[in-house]
Amino acid sequence: FSFNHGILSPEEVLRQAHDLGLQAGALTDINCTAGLSDLFRLADQHKVRPVAGIEFRCGARTLFI
């Protein structure tokens, strides 16, 4: 859930993952971890395992963790 780029909130990611029958839902923020606390806090409620990721943008270089 990157403030300027995000389409779905952490809760919407979990809800959609659950509705699709997925066991896990991933959230990849850009240059921050803004949505991860909500993702982990709400995961049990939706019965979905949270998966955290970060996309670091460094000029023309992009790194994914």
Image: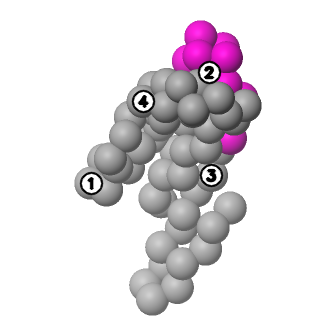
Label placed on residue 4: 1
Q: Are marks 3 and 4 in contact (CB under 8 Å)?
A: no
Q: Quadrant of the N terminus?
A: top left
In the rendered image, residue 63, in percent from the top left (x then y), is placed at: 61, 74
Question: In the figure, residue 59 lies in which quadrant?
Answer: bottom left
Label placed on residue 12: 4
Q: Is residue 45 magenta?
A: yes
Label 4, secondary structure: give it.
helix
In the rendered image, residue 53, in percent from the top left (x then y), is placed at: 62, 52
What is the three-letter code of the residue carrying label 2? Ala
Residue assigned mark 3: 53
Among all residues in the image, which is located at the extreme front? Answer: 20
Residue assigned mark 2: 43
Task: Indicate which label's residue lies in the foreground, 3 or 2.
Answer: 2
In 3D space, how far apart are the residues under numbered discs 1 and 2 (Cα atoms)? 23 Å
Report the magenta residues as a range: 41-51
Question: In the figure, residue 39 lies in which quadrant?
Answer: top right
In 3D space, how far apart are the residues under numbered discs 4 and 2 (Cα atoms)? 11 Å
What is the three-letter code of the residue carrying label 1? Asn
Crowd class of label 2 (few under 14; some 14 to 19; many from 20; radius 10 Å): many
Q: Is residue 63 above or below residue 8?
A: below
Among all residues in the image, which is located at the extreme top? Answer: 45
Label 1, secondary structure: give it.
loop
- Give whichever of discs 1 and 4 has the lower sequence position: 1
In 3D space, how far apart are the residues under numbered discs 3 and 2 (Cα atoms)? 15 Å
In the rendered image, residue 35, in percent from the top left (x then y), is placed at: 47, 37
